[in-house]
Image (cartoon, rainbow, N blue to C red):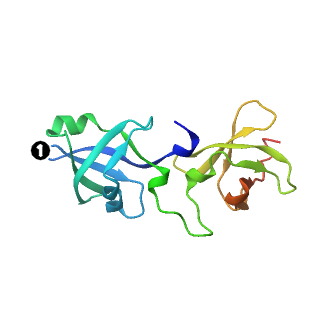
Amino acid sequence: MPADDRLIAVGRVAGAFGVRGEVRISTFTEEPLALARFRELKRQDGSPALTITSAREGKDGIVVRCSGIETKEQADALRGLRLFIPREALPEPDEDEFYLADLIGLAAVTPEGERIGKVKSVQDFGAGDILEIIPEEGGPTWYLPFTRDAVPEVKIADGLIVAVRPNEIE
């Protein structure tokens, strides 16, 4: 998939709801029902995952009916499936805002302007967002907390972030 066809994670299937094939989805959107507006959800590889035909709010997300999912067993088989939408399906952020996915591919430079790498991915292992950085000089990737101290500036239009490397990385 070309870089301009990036996919954004928007939810994860939590399992079945009831016995008639309804699917519970934990959403990553600010408004849980916003996910239903996209209807066509994708897998991480870009292939079709679910087509939402109806949705309502549920505990910790939404409950949806999907094309082709008729039984509790079919819905439960999807448990854990991560759901994505194309980046271009999202509204453009305001002038001083961005989506975390927009950080991928940006150059990482020191406050002095020295290029130290490139953002490979944005991860959240439970303690907040962290950036995986591919070092400029090669070698293994390293992680940078996505905090104001570690990343004091994000310049999407310039294609870079200002990064303060942890001492262990230098």
Where residue 25 appears, as percent x and y from the top left, is 31, 50
Looking at the image, which is closer to me, 146 or 11?
A: 11
Looking at the image, which is closer to me, 53 or 78?
A: 53
Where residue 16 appears, as percent x and y from the top left, is 21, 43
Task: Residue at 27%, 46% (x, y): give it.
Answer: 51
Give, as a three-letter code, the residue at label 1.
Arg
Farthest bottom residue in view: 95
Where residue 169 appears, as percent x and y from the top left, is 78, 41
Task: Residue at 28%, 56% (x, y): give it.
Answer: 62
Farthest left residue in view: 20
Vertical order, 149 against 143 (above or below): below
Pointer 1 local density, CA inside 10 Å: few below 14, some 14–19, many at least 20: some
**Mark 1: secondary structure:** loop
Q: Is residue 140 left or right of residue 63?
A: right
Quadrant location, the C terminus? top right
Task: Residue at 72%, 31% (x, y): give it.
Answer: 140
Q: Is residue 99 left or right of residue 47?
A: right
Confirm whether residue 23 shows in the render.
Answer: yes
Q: Is residue 127 left or right of residue 149?
A: left
Q: Return the residue at label 1.
A: 20
Confirm whether residue 128 shows in the render.
Answer: no
Where residue 105 appears, as percent x and y from the top left, is 66, 45
Task: Residue at 31%, 61% (x, y): give it.
Answer: 33
The total number of labels drawn is 1
